[in-house]
Image (tube, coloured by chain):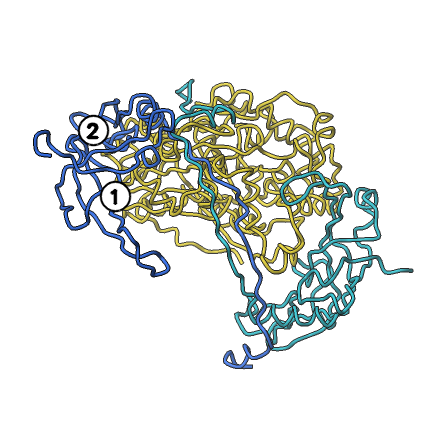
Amino acid sequence: MVARPNIHVKSKVAIVGAGLTLFRRRMLETPRELAWEAARMALEQAGLTLRDIDCVVVGSAPDAFDGVHMKGEYLADGAGGIGRPTVRVFVGGGTGVFVPIAAWWHVASGLCRSVLAVAEEKMSPAHPHPQGVFAYIWDPILERPLGPNLIWIFALEMRRYMYKCNVPKETIAKVSVKNKRNALDHPAAQAAAKITVEDVLKSEVLVWPVQRLDISPVSDGAAALVMVNENEARRVTDSPVWVEGVGWTLDNTHWYNRELAYPRYVNYAARMAYKMAGIERPWKEIDVAEPYDPFDYKELHHIEGLMLARRCEAPKLLEEGWFDRDGELPTSPSGGLLGVGNPIAAAGLMKVAEIFWQLRYEAGARQVKKPVHKGVAQAWGDLMQAATVVVLGV
Amino acid sequence: MGEPRLPGTYLKEKEMYQLPGIVEHRPDAKYSFSAGQAVSRFLEGLKQGRILGKRCPRCGRVYVPPRSYCEYCFAPTAEWVEVSGEGEVNTAVVSYISTFRERLEEPEIIAVIRLYAPGYTGKKDEYEFPGIFHKLCGVKPEDVMSGRVIGMRVRPRWKPPERRVGSITDIECFEPVEG
Amino acid sequence: MAWSMWWKEARRIYKFPGKMEVEKYVYTPGLHGLEAARKLKEEGKFVGTKCGDTIYYPPTTFCPDFSEGGLAEVRGPWRVAAFTVIRETMEGERLEKPIVVALIVPDDAVGGIIHYVDVDPDKIYIGMEVEPVLKPREERKGNPVEDIVHFKPKIEEGEG
């Protein structure tokens, strides 16, 4: 079932710069201004200018959030795409990590020497709440007549996971506590906080078992990476971070005909990326991870899908502090979506940027304690369907 | 990260509305969704108080709700099957909010029900199964929280025939099978 | 069963209505956009983004080379660069007074604005000099499309 990609590439691909805007509930900047701010910062960090860029990859989630159709075209000038081969990619919540995957094949194929990879999301234009846009995720015939709320599907998955793996709510809440604490050191953070398990359990119950503090916030924001081929990388930096593996998978939309306790699509995508990276024992070989955490239980779910823990083992390791910043395998040292914020596509790319900074030892107060050589970032999207995985190494 | 101060200008909701130059627009997009062949037949079945599925002639997978094709074999799923409607609760939750996040007076219980299908070749623990997404009645929120409902045997509670229209809501909810 | 037969099974294809459940979108003006909105609302002046010797209108904040632009006033004169005349409604009914819509470009900037021109459709031509007719100050919101009532041909003094 695992895809076997052609790994005979024309060139290795490196990340040489990353940029971010603040993540906030609503911002003054237009979507293209946010894209520009992140892209400009990434170029500056790489020591390059827009003139050095061959191709552009833009990522953004549904048009109905920004309230602008054909967002790829709309964002093109702010992403540096004018007059260049430019493409917009979209796989729901998985988009943020799909952006560097698409940028990777632009460079690995030999087509482009350098790619500006930009992800932007502005969720604040939709009123009264972006929830109205999420309603269109549901099947209009078999699901929407029941009057669903988006949180239902997460609650159902979380409950199933709790049942299958016998995990108490208290343990899951610890992910939220960890990530919001980690985010205190992140300059972009929107929802950083020192909270306790008690606080999570006392927060408003929305759809039991999901409570207010189990969920990441609604955000505006942008992120960007500069990705180049091996020659360019050697020219512009002494510390390139290599994209060693990429993987992505799509499952079907029939989420209630599937076992929700385990994300097989994440596992397939991870196996594809690990195979390319020559990783056989990810739980030992990966030093730092950014699994996608729009909800706290999802981080545990994805840790297992990424084979960083055995099935149902992630909660136990979490309890032991395994995933803390000074633990054996730090996860979401950035603070993740729960702490930094969730401008959908930008949040996924922020996770890749975090691994980039971690592997360059540039994460400052967020730098994990152990030595790091390899990291993995992952995002998930759609109706428990899409998985995107990137393995980075130095 | 080299840059201590990141770009971006936060606005409070009030501030946003006071800005000169903001533009508001009210979309008015209306849609009409077609249920397609297989699901239309399924809806016809619901109107008659029957739950229908389709079986793949190659691999034997049973699809409830039905699909016109088997996604694994990429073959048309020729044969219709009827299931009893009885099944087991796979997962269930308690919703305290409406679609638009207003507090509900009475919480609703939402579930995924794994349906018993005749001749289904899958093992009990297999990743995929015929199933339905619906509401549960006759159980309490505490039963969801304690886990008592998971694995519980349930069956559909139908609306009276004259009120059925060919919709998933022709089933009022799923309720526990007595005894 | 052959694919060609399989569609004959349902007696009726069910349809379900849907409606986008977004009440409204609120678009913020952006960085230079906010400055331009203030200037238009308060002083009735137009502001663009200046990059080197070129002014871009509407303001973009950033320049094509990705540097940050400056603010600069756009003074015009404004000219018709392209136009179209609407004589019927969407339903095909004849309009009493045709509507003239034009792309209007200022001489001193790159870019422009699409707006109505209050002119006899037979007299408009490409290159015609026009000027904006603004709503009174207290009615202006800072958004040029709403704040301009329409453009009108500029009549040189002494000609009229």
Depicted B35 relative to depicted A234: above or below:
below
Q: Quadrant of the N terminus of chain A?
A: bottom right
In the figure, the shade used to draw chain A is yellow
| Viewer-side residue, A84 vs C117 | C117
For disc 1, the marked residue is: A84
**Label 1 near label 2: C-beta < 8 Å?**
no
Q: Amino acid at mark 1?
A: Arg
| Viewer-side residue, A303 vs C54 | C54
Local crowd size for mark 2, using a 10 Å CA cut-off: few (<14), some (14–19), many (≥20): many
Local crowd size for mark 1, using a 10 Å CA cut-off: few (<14), some (14–19), many (≥20): few
- Residue found 70% across the figure and 70% down from its top: B47
For disc 2, the marked residue is: C55
Q: Which chain corresponds to the colour blue?
A: C
Q: Is residue A265 visible?
A: yes
Q: Is residue A238 visible?
A: no
Q: In what element is the residue under mark 1?
A: loop
